[in-house]
Every structure is written in structure tokens, then in C-alpha cells.
Amino acid sequence: MKVTWETRKICGLPDDFPVSCTAVRIPTYRAHSETIIVETEKPIDIEAAKKAVAEAPGVKLVDNTAADPPTYPMPLTATGQEDVECGRIRRSEVFGDYGLEFFVSGDQLLRGAALNAVIVAETMALNGSLSKVPV
């Protein structure tokens, strides 16, 4: 939020002017990171979103900015693990109650396209989707 507040101040914008951003610390070794902003049709419950992330397979909730030191997804901490770190979960400043913003970081060597393809294939085998594919 600091960057948002500073941007408004430097640009002389009112406090209610919608600015959305996330600061990223670098350098990275072998992880990719991105900010994801979602606009929704219904109002978002931030705690419910955090619970959904915490329960999602292949995702690790890392979201405690009040801790000392604070914890949030970073390429350095995502490196070496298969799960993708997700955190900085918050209400969107642009979409208000109808938006969600979060930051993810994942090891592109361990959780890249190949592992995801295997996971999708395993899921399809378990739910019978592969038997519906014409040969």
C-alpha cells in the first residue's frame, strides 16, 4: 500500500483516486512472479479468498505482512518447492469490493509446464476425462 499512497501524494491525486500496484523485490534466481488482479461479479470476502487459497492443492498461502519479519511470496522463498506461493491478498483499489489482488511466486523448474501437464493428466485419469478423448 505504501507505493499506492506515495503515488497519490507525488502526483497530487485525491485519496480516493484508484491506484493499484504491487512492489516486487529482485533479483530472482529461478522463480517467476506476477501480480494478479481479478474483477468479480459479486463482492469479495477477503478471508474466504484466503481460505480458498490455503486449501487449494499446489498452492501455499504466504500472507502475513504483520509478522516480524513479514511473510509474503518472494522468488527466493518459492525457489526449490513445487507449490506456488500466494499472498498479498487484498481488496482491489480499482474494482473495490468487486475485485481481488494477489501476488504469486513459483519455481519455474519445479512447477513449470511439465509438472502442470502431469497433474492435469493425472486428474483427467482419475475423473474419467481421458476415457472420453477420441483415439
Image: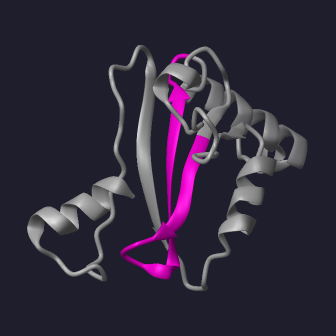
Q: How many discs mark residues in the rendered view?
A: 0
- Image position of 100 (left or right of 3): right
**Where 16 falls versus 132 (above or below)?**
below
Indicate the quadrant containing the C terminus: top left, top right, bottom left or bottom right: top right
The image shows residue 6 at horizontal and vertical percentages of: 23, 59
> Left or right: where does residue 73 sit relative to residue 19?
right
Q: Which residues are magenta?
A: 86-109
| Residue at 63% from the left image edge and 31% from the top image edge | 117
> Eyeballing the image, is 6 above or below 95?
above
Q: Position of residue 89 (x, y in %)?
A: 57, 57
Tell me where residue 60 appears, x and y as whole percent.
70, 38
Name the residue located 42 percent from the left edge and 79 percent from the top edge.
95
Q: Is 47 placed left or right of 42 in the picture? A: right
57, 52: nearer the viewer: 52
Q: Principal SS element in the magenta part?
A: strand
Q: Is residue 101 magenta?
A: yes
91 within the magenta span: yes
Q: Nearer the viewer, residue 104 or 125?
A: 104
Residue found 72% across the figure and 66% down from its top? 47
Q: Residue furthest front?
A: 68
